[in-house]
Amino acid sequence: MSTETAPTADRVVAPPPPAGWEEARSRVYAVGLAAALPAVARPLADIDGSTLAEPLTTRTDLPAFPTSSVDGWAVRGTGPWRVVGRVLAGSTPAPLTEDGTTVEIATGAMVPEGATAVLRVEESTTVDGLVRGTPRETPEWRQPGEEAYADEELLPVGTPVDPAVIGLAASCGHDTLRVRRAPRAALLVFGDELLTAGPPAAGRVRDALGPAVPGWLRRYGCQIRPSDVVGPVADTLPAHVAALRSALAGADLVCTTGGTMNGPVDHLHPTLEALGADYVVNTVAVRPGFPMLLARLAGHDGRIRFVAGLPGNPQSAIVALVSLVAPLLAGLQGRSMPVLPQATLAEAVPGRGDHTHLALVRLDRAAGTATPVRHVGSAMLRGLAGADGFAVIRPGTSGDPGDRVPIVPLPLLPGERAS
């Protein structure tokens, strides 16, 4: 990484003024976008969850040729019609050159040149080799370019790739697409007080973030393997420096849990100093979630890596994820800054003075309402498990029933769409 300074354990650090929540989100998105991951060409089978690095365009008209939308008869002129052949999907038919002739045609098959109509099989009769019936007035085939014309832009740069996008790309004739690869992430869990198995006891608590945070990161489009989760890391400065240096060697983003204060065993700040990091955001005026941070480091290869310092309290850590990590990852993937939907508060939500309050809520999407959930202490996860997102109560305000407020949704799996 960049030039290191010697770790110093004995020092007094004046806490910086916290950034406003909206300002912090804009700031981390901008630095993420400036460090957007390089574009690579990948086969369609390998791009689910990535992001388009160039517009998706069609290589031909869609459909590329007239195709029958029903099983039946492609006819020329008025009936009855003499059967002169059959057309199945995947074949190129000979033209119909004579009035009063027809070919049997399958759904999706190419309509022969010269055909004037397609007669549905269920609306036809065949007697003595002649087909009779009345074609519908509406054409029973799809015209070339009905869905899109050749070279038409269907999706812009920055579109998240899901199975629907992959299917569309295949239908357009693409075998590969240029995409931004998924960011690689790692997680360092700090805290000697943490247990990794069994129930809490004897002053030690169970680590809830080590098992949970990787799942949130995957929902934001990251790649993270079980071996990328390390901890608990010993509460010493050398152990923190070594663990963070090792994680940064293979990750675009390293999340840490705990240690974001300046207490006697909070070593994240001196670790970042030792590794030559600079702060993008150092504390945010939001509750819960205080304090959180985002720092960046330049590697020997010139590529920027990021460190997201999540608080040790579980709900606060998730607030840090949705506040800082989500917009950062949107920028790194070349996506647009997430636009927050709005909902109407069904119950009152208190303000938090000069801090933004992110209040856990359950959404009724049919009614467009948000109802606060219970058990929402900074160290609690029960409320989070039953919530859909966070209502944003801006500084100096409170939320009254009927107020329209922004909602920070909890992330979905790649390809999953909100109902």
Image (cartoon, rainbow, N blue to C red):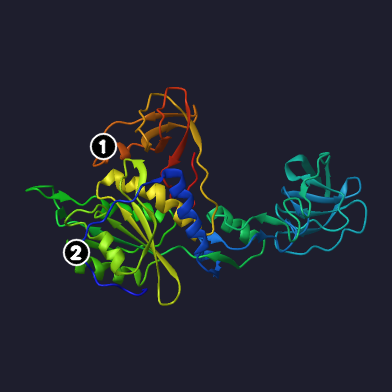
**Residue type at the position of mark 1:** Gly
Q: Nearer the viewer, residue 283 or 128?
A: 283
**Secondary element at tag 2:** loop
Residue 199 locus on image (x, y percent):
13, 48
Q: Are marks 2 and 1 in contact (CB under 8 Å)?
A: no
> Can you see residue 94?
yes
Residue 87 locus on image (x, y percent):
76, 59
Residue at the location (52% across, 55% down)? 162
Q: Is residue 333 left or right of residue 294?
A: right
- Alpha-carbon span between mark 2 and mark 1: 32 Å
> Can you see residue 49?
no
**Residue on which the image places disc 1:** 377
Compared to residue 382, the image places residue 277 above or below, namely: below
**Residue on which the image places disc 2:** 9
Q: Is residue 96 left or right of residue 231?
A: right
Q: Quadrant of the N terminus?
A: bottom left
**Secondary element at tag 1:** loop
Residue at the location (47% across, 25% down)? 403
Residue 157 locus on image (x, y percent):
61, 58
